[in-house]
Amino acid sequence: MGRDGKEIEVQGVASVSRKGGFYTRYTEAQSLGAIRGGHGDLVVISLPVSLPLQGRVALVTGAAKRLGRAVALRLAEEGADLVVHYRSSQGEAQDVVKKIEKLGRRASAIAADLSSVAEIKRLFDEAGKRFGRLDILVNSAANFLPANMVSTTEEIWDSALDTNLRAPFFCAQAAAPWLRRTQGVIINFADSSGLLGWPGYIPHSVSKAGVIMLTKVLAKALAPEVRVNAIVPGTITMEGDPQEWEADFVKLAPLRRTGKPNDIADAVSYLIRAEFMTGHVLVLDGGRSLGPTAVEFR
């Protein structure tokens, strides 16, 4: 009804906003009487909407900072409840939890040293007790240690392989019983070094190449109940990163820019929904892995 008590005719949608699990449509409308009298009405229609990850539980390793944080917040925006894993960044992890709770989702921060298989088992046992299910595992925790042919030590080698390759496997092993029940998904994080090989980061490159093969093997081992895919981020710049990083790395990519956290969060969101995809890798590097011919020999 319009202000004059007559029925109104909806003529078009002016804007749409989402708040608290509802889409609110602001619609410009005029009544028959308003058309004659020149009066207008604003009609507000609230429609309940089911968010795509409503009712699902995700565990994101390394979720206190950087890309893990961005992914955790995106999944919460899409309706998931979150297990926020961290190693030592308790304050940052609790901040992520608070942001997720403000979105109306449940969240819990759990500390664990992923270099320890016992700690990994405890992480997933605790997550199961708190949430009762698991639908999504995102293995984003990693270290990034520079080490070339001369400077690589046994300690650096073991640290890179333990955190970047060994941990994702044992996280997948611990998550598998939960994920089989829910027809869940695992998303592993490799990076460009696993494709290109960086001589200044030998252990890191080897570990990330291993993640790519681990993804393929797990996809076969856990099929058909669980899908497993990987993301290969290129250079991703975050707020607060030195500006010279971006200036240097944009020269290496045909798209002439670095990636942003939302680029990676978008890819994770897609892989969760891609129900006919498993054992594959999404490369998000602005074309850098195409090699110099992509830019120099047009």
Image (cartoon, grey):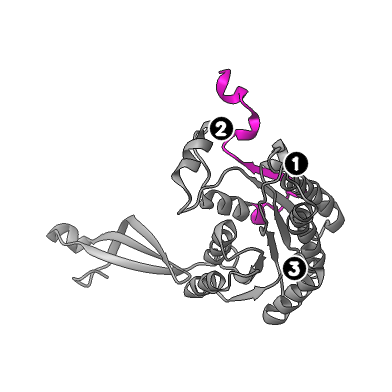
Residue drawn 57% across the image and 54% down it: 265
Nearer the observer: mark 3 or 1; the answer is 1
- Residue under numbered circle 1: 150
* Residue 140: x %, y % from top left: 66, 58
Q: Quadrant of residue 116?
A: bottom right
Q: Can residue 178 be seen here?
A: yes
Q: Earlier in the sequence, mark 2 or mark 1?
A: 1
* Residue 240: x %, y % from top left: 45, 54
Mark number, residue 252: 2
Residue extending farthest to the left is: 37
Q: Is residue 189 magenta?
A: no
Residue type at mark 1 is: Val
Nearer the observer: mark 2 or 1; the answer is 1
Q: Which residues are magenta?
A: 271-298
Q: Give me the C-alpha separation between circle 3 and circle 1.
A: 47 Å
Mark number, residue 182: 3
Q: Is residue 294 magenta?
A: yes
Q: Secondary structure at mark 2?
A: helix
Circles 2 and 3, Cβ within 8 Å, touching? The answer is no
Q: Quadrant of the C terminus?
A: top right
- What crowding class fits label 3: few (fewer than 14 Cα within 10 Å), some (14-19), or many (20 or more)? some
Depth order, front residue of 230/249: 249
Q: Quadrant of residue 50?
A: bottom right
Q: Earlier in the sequence, mark 2 or mark 3?
A: 3
Residue drawn 68% across the image and 81% down it: 130
Residue type at mark 2 is: Leu
Q: Give me the C-alpha separation between circle 2 and circle 3.
A: 41 Å
Circles 3 and 1, Cβ within 8 Å, touching? The answer is no
Residue drawn 55% across the image and 58% down it: 66
Q: Secondary structure at mark 1?
A: loop
